Amino acid sequence: MLTIDSPRYITDFSALLELPKLETLFIVNAKRITALDWLSPLADRLKVLGIEGSMHTDQKIERIAPLRGFSLEALYLISTRVADQDLTPLHGMTSLRYFRTAITAPQRAFMALNEALPDCQCKCFDPAEWKGFRDPPKPKAK
């Protein structure tokens, strides 16, 4: 397990790709990470991934599409905002058993993910969790 906390000035995480036994990776409060494409070489070995913000600052990620094809068992996107709000890249991740995130996509996206992954646990799959919440604003068109 490797946890990297608040790497303020690191922009290149490619050295992590050279760790052959890396199965669990948490990167917390890495303001310079906005894309996940660099993780692709880890698709065959990562089991747990956390890309998280801090208590006071959300981690902003463009999209989670680069995780398509991973066989994660757990995914943590705590205090993370996914700009495109698209959860469909996770639909084929049948190994995913635990997903922890905030309400950063429309409720229908979470319900579709729950349908695609019925064995996965996520608080956002419970309609009661949405009481008092509205869908997040739609992503801005580019």
Image (cartoon, helix red, strand yellow):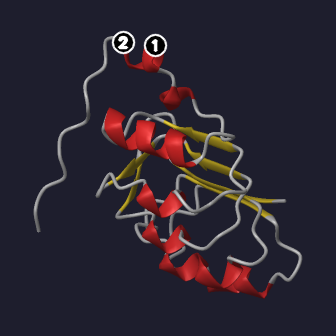
Q: Secondary structure at mark 2?
A: loop
Check the image and report above or below for 21 versus 120. below
Quarter assignment of residue 104? top left
Check the image and report above or below for 73 versus 97. below
Q: Is the Cβ of the residue at disc 2 closer than 8 Å to that at disc 1?
A: yes
Q: Position of residue 2 (x, y in %)?
A: 79, 62
x 59%, y 34%: residue? 122
10 on left or right of 85: right
Q: Which residue is mark 2?
A: 131
Between 68 and 137, the one lying in front of the other is: 68
Quadrant holding the C terminus: bottom left
x 17%, y 46%: residue? 138
17 on left or right of 23: left
Q: Position of residue 38 (x, y in %)?
A: 54, 81
Task: Give the numbered dot on residue 128.
Answer: 1
x 57%, y 62%: residue? 92
Check the image and report above or below for 85 versus 38. above
x 65%, y 70%: residue? 70
Q: CA distance from mark 2 to mark 1?
A: 5 Å
Between 108 and 14, the one lying in front of the other is: 108
In the image, farthest residue toward the left? 141
Task: Give the numbered dot on residue 42.
Answer: none
Label 2, residues with CA under 10 Å away: few <14, some 14-19, many ≥20: few
Q: Position of residue 136 (x, y in %)?
A: 25, 36
Between 128 and 36, the one lying in front of the other is: 128
Residue 12 seen by the camera:
no
Q: Secondary structure at mark 1?
A: helix
